Structure formats: structure tokens, C-alpha cells
Image (cartoon, rainbow, N blue to C red):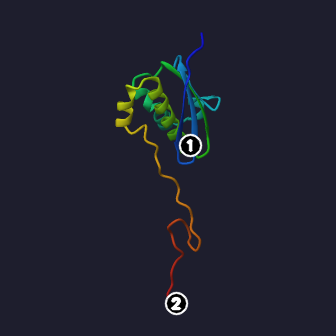
Amino acid sequence: MAVIEYNATGRRKTSIAQVFMKPGKGNIIINDKPLTKYYPYETMKMIVQQPLNLVAVNGKYDVTVRVKGGGVTGQAGAIRHGIARALVKINSDFRTQLKKEGLLTRDPRVVERKKYGQKGARARFQFSKR
């Protein structure tokens, strides 16, 4: 009998995470590496596991993630968003809890582009009257 697999996509800044969840022992694999190897920092592990801990299913599903783009924090946010979306597909009752914590909302903040004639996105070159 085929195992049911749930998938979802999470995004944050320029990172995109494809999340695949299936019933299992709670293993989290990111880009073919275990969570502890991919993220040695405890804060990043907490961010990734936040939706699972919130709905108390940590250890019940195996999570496989393919993530690309962005940096460490953006990727962790994208994975969290993807896991939250996949949990809603698994059980729609989780939606209220996840929505209340803001885990289903895509964070729209991205880096503002640098404009011509300026030093940066908003910073100007120093002005001198003389």
C-alpha cells in the first residue's frame, strides 16, 4: 500500500522551500542532510520545528525539504512556511492555531533595490553646498 505524502511550498525573501511530509519517526532532512548538520544553530532548528511543536505532531511525520536561494535565515523561514502549509493539508483543524501564530502568512519583506544616483536603496551621497 502506498504511503500518503503531503507537499507544500514555502517562501521567504528570495528562498524557496519544497516540503514533503509523510508519516514517520520525525526525521527532518534538508537538502539531503539531517537538520542538525544543515543548521548547527539552535535558533534555526527552533524556527524550522516551530509549526510541528505548535500543533504537537513533532516526531509523527518525516519531513524532507529541498530549499534554494537566499541565506540561512531566509531558508529557515521558507522551510517553516512550507511545513505550516503542509500541516494544513494533513489536517485542516491545524489552520486556526497556525494562522493565529502567523505561520501561514508569507512574509512579504524583501530587499529594496538600489536606485541610480544614490549610494543605496535609500541612502544618498553626501550633499555639500560648496
Residue in the image at 54% along x and 20% along y:
22
Residue with the most extreme bottom position: 130
Residue in the image at 53% along x and 56% along y:
111
- Pick the residue in front: 116 or 123: 116
Where, by quadrant of the figure, is residue 100 drawn?
Answer: top left
Asked if residue 47 is positioned above or below residue 12 in the image, the reply reads above
Residue with the mark numbered 1? 72
Q: Position of residue 106 (x, y in %)?
A: 46, 43
The amino acid type found where label 2 is placed reads: Arg
The amino acid type found where label 1 is placed reads: Val
Side (left or right) of 102 relative to 125: left
Task: Give SS at disc 1.
Answer: helix
Packing grade of label 1 (10 A; few <14, some 14-19, many >=20) is: few
Packing grade of label 2 (10 A; few <14, some 14-19, many >=20) is: few
Residue with the most extreme top position: 1
Residue with the mark numbered 2? 130
Q: Position of residue 67 (x, y in %)?
A: 60, 37
Q: Position of residue 110 (x, y in %)?
A: 51, 53
Where's the N terminus, which quadrant? top right
Where, by quadrant of the figure, is residue 55 drawn?
Answer: top left
